Image (cartoon, rainbow, N blue to C red):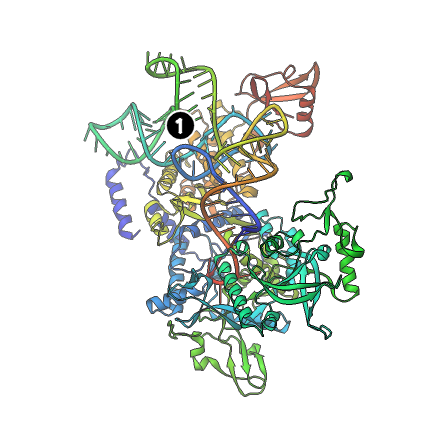
Amino acid sequence: MSADDNSETATVDRSDRPSEDRPKDERYDAQRIETKWFERWQSDPSLYAAERDSKKKKYYVLEMLPYPSGVLHMGHVRNYSIGDALARYMWMNGYNVLHPMGWDSFGLPAENAAIANNTPPRQWTLGNIANMKAQMKRIGFAYDWSCEVTTCLPDYYRWNQWFFLKLYERGLAYRKKSKVNWCPKCATVLANEQVVNGCCWRHEDTLVEQRELEQWFLRITNYADELLRDLDKLGGWPEKVRTMQRNWIGRSEGALVDFKLDSGDEAPKVKISVFTTRIDTIYGATSIQLAPEHPIVAELTSSSPDLRAKVDQLIAEQRKAKEKGDIGEIEKHGVNTGRYAVNPFNGEKVPIWVANYILMDYGTGAIMSVPAHDERDYDFAKKYKLEIRLVILPIANDPEETIAEPPLPFLGHDGMLINSGPFSGLECDAAIKKMSEYAEKYRFGKATVTYRLKDWGISRQRYWGTPIPMLYCEKDGIVPVPEKELPVILPENIEITLAGGSPLGRVPEFVNATCPKCGGPARRETDTMDTFVDSSWYPYRYTDAHNDRAPFDKKIVDYWFPIDQYIGGVEHAILHLMYMRFWTKFMRDMGLVANDEPAERLFTQGMVIKDGAKMSKSLGNVVSPDEMVARYGADAARMYSLFAAPPDRDLDWQDSGIEGIQRFLGRVYRFIVRNAKPKDPAWRAAVPADLPPAARQIQRKLHQTIKRITDDFQGRWHFNTCISAIMELVNTLYGAEEAIGRGIVPMPLLADVQRNLVLLLAPFSPYLAHELWEMLGETSTLLKAPWPKYDPALAKEEEIVIPVQVNGKLRGTIVVAADSDEPFVIERALSDEKVKRFLAGKQIVKRIYVPGKLVNIVVR
RNA sequence: GCCGGGAUGGCGAAAUUGGCAGACGCAGCGGACUUAAAAUCCGCAGGGGCCAAAAGCCCUGUGGGGGUUCGAUUCCCCCUCCCGGCACCA
């Protein structure tokens, strides 16, 4: 859409139009309208600014900030159209709205682009931001740009560093060895995404290796219990997200039990700690299974190269399965070490195996194998012909029917212990309690809780990220960078190449530093932070984006938080949202914020699909928002993205669909062009109470529409049906045009319905709504014009009330819609009981069944 | 594999509480307007059958199989396929 296009169409219009008969142009010209309002809005940067020190009720609506990949895609348009509609609705309801936008601008793609185009990551990133920001403005999203946040700039990331120091001070940041993907040809670390079928994405013939590196971790597991518990507070979050988070945290109660390594005559010293959720089955343990990477395995295999080789094979199998993501489906393999461990409950020696299905990063990396009562142990025992010993008998409802030989494995808790020494005869849950206490008393175990959740590894061996503010001094070891020296600036204009190692490691001015403790030479940490750190606290920064003394001011944050509505893709349901929740809790414990949770309500929208597949360059099915805006207008593009599917579902993009929306906007435009008569003396008069049927019908439809849309904004957010409802209203108006032409519809009602129609349209189609608002002679700002009020009396259908008799007795009244079938007496049709049920429980029953006939009724 | 979600006309979808399945829109067909086309306006339309056609009527239909119910797209059980997440894409 260039200026040339606009002037051209305008010229055609002028020559086309007999100016006498049709003083107004009836053609809906989206480009003309949108250019006009775009320019007006541009000239007032404070238009969408949140008020400071406002007496109004606050409303913080936030969409997940985008990664500046280059251009907006339709997923963005959809996400921001949802948020924008809500923000505009809240403005119209008199709230002080905070509606910010920013850029999650650190990350891998900038480095890949740097390698591909030889462009510095900063330049590439900032260029993309400028481009995408211009696109957002053109679409007309109502953001308060005065609090824009760009995470790759030092005024933001210095606070990442500050938070890291605070985490470190509190023991919540620590170093440990952890594995990374390593491509020997690139001589660099690869992201999971860069590993394809176990090989490097740049070198398809090169197997990716696993290397152990010292890395920084954040103790999110310290908050595991609270993160789990507080999910119950998040009533405004989708149930599915809460379920996923609950499962991700994966709390399980169980017990740790130490099996001593049997090492011949000497008193055994080495202990193998196993985690089990079923200590009650321990008398059925017939082997110990270790993860192949369990530290003790090295010792057990030290004397046998043959055994070592077999274990290495298991490691390889496990890694391959993990990469493929089907670790649960792995074909179970194991190897007997020939050594034994002692079951502390009965002193029995059980063989120690190493198995490829045991994971080092869950529990203790060691399990006791109870084939009779665990599915995986059962499969494994069958395969390797290990003993299967029954120690739980199911308890049947009828004691006579107790099954002596249940089908194996028997997994239920509804059982009774047998062959379990002094614990025989106990029921499972009682036994779990007793046996845990017993283990604790004799100091070989205890009841414990484990989580599936792992600590958060934030080290990235990459350039384009926040430098971790740590120093390594030969004398003083690990030394944090003093707070006053922040930010540790990421050096710019450095060469990003494929050649090995971390790019920062090759910048001596960066690496070489001075130890703040001893003043001697120190080496700077060259790893950068996971970009999820950036996005874990950005909503707080929006509220006080230019603060250079603190990440934000507590008073300001306390006013705006929690976020009233957070909106983003369902793909972030676990990681990002978990990290953000963790960060909030950590900041609360620091006294920086008052809220326990970041967001009151969450909405997860579905993906935008084209031709049944995710939009991607390789499939060539990418729809460009710019092209849509140029062809159909921004209003049509955003409205279609809301109309084509309910926002929480995936959306299948069809170009022809957007044409329909454009047509609809034209219908609205033309109706108002023809019927706006603000100069008419009756235009602003009160709507008469007594209306002819044709007018009454319009009024009823209007109020029904207001109700539907208002209700949806309150909860369900099915904007697709909201837009359908507006279409129905417009169809009703077109159907009544003859009556309007004959003056049957009084002018005050005609004015009222047009004003309300424009107000209803404002959240979805702001450009057109503003144009029409002006056309209706309104001088107030549409952005903050009051949202239409629903009048139930005016929405009500005409009804006939009739008594309900059942078996001759009056049971209540039914109200039948006047336009439905004739009234119906239920007497002979339904049983007394049925009618009673209908009348008792529910207020409204739309239809009830009677043999051979369905009637519409409303029970009062 | 595990966790979460989904499947309804030719297509996107609707049915808010278990009550007339397919609102609204796209594509299609027919009509009006036009010299014509575009645009616009009006109408028809799940599938099948009875019928030359229409009106009307009948059968059938919400991924597949089973169940609960007077009644199921909706609730329960089992299955198939598709999508998201699985901790270094963001």
Q: Could you say which is closer to the camera, residue A803 or residue A807?
A: A807
Q: Residues within 10 Å of mark 1 (few under 14, many from 20)?
A: some
Q: Could you say which is closer to the camera, residue A773 or residue A470?
A: A470
**How far across and down, in percent of the image, does residue A682 sit?**
46, 32
Q: Residue at x 48, y 37 (%)?
A: A721
Asked if residue A681 can be seen in this view, the reply is: no
Asked if residue A646 can be seen in this view, the reply is: yes
Q: Quadrant of residue A494?
A: bottom left
- Answer left or right for A205 relative to A96: left
Q: Disc 1 marks which amino acid?
A: Glu
- Answer left or right for A420 relative to A830: right
Q: Residue at x 31, y 51 (%)?
A: A1
Q: Is residue A803 above or below residue A252?
A: above
Q: Could you say which is closer to the camera, residue A198 or residue A88?
A: A198
Q: Residue at x 48, y 65 (%)?
A: A151
Question: Considering the image in quadrants, where does the C terminus of chain A appear?
Answer: top right
Tell me which chain the residue with mark 1 is part of.
A
Q: Count the marks: how many?
A: 1
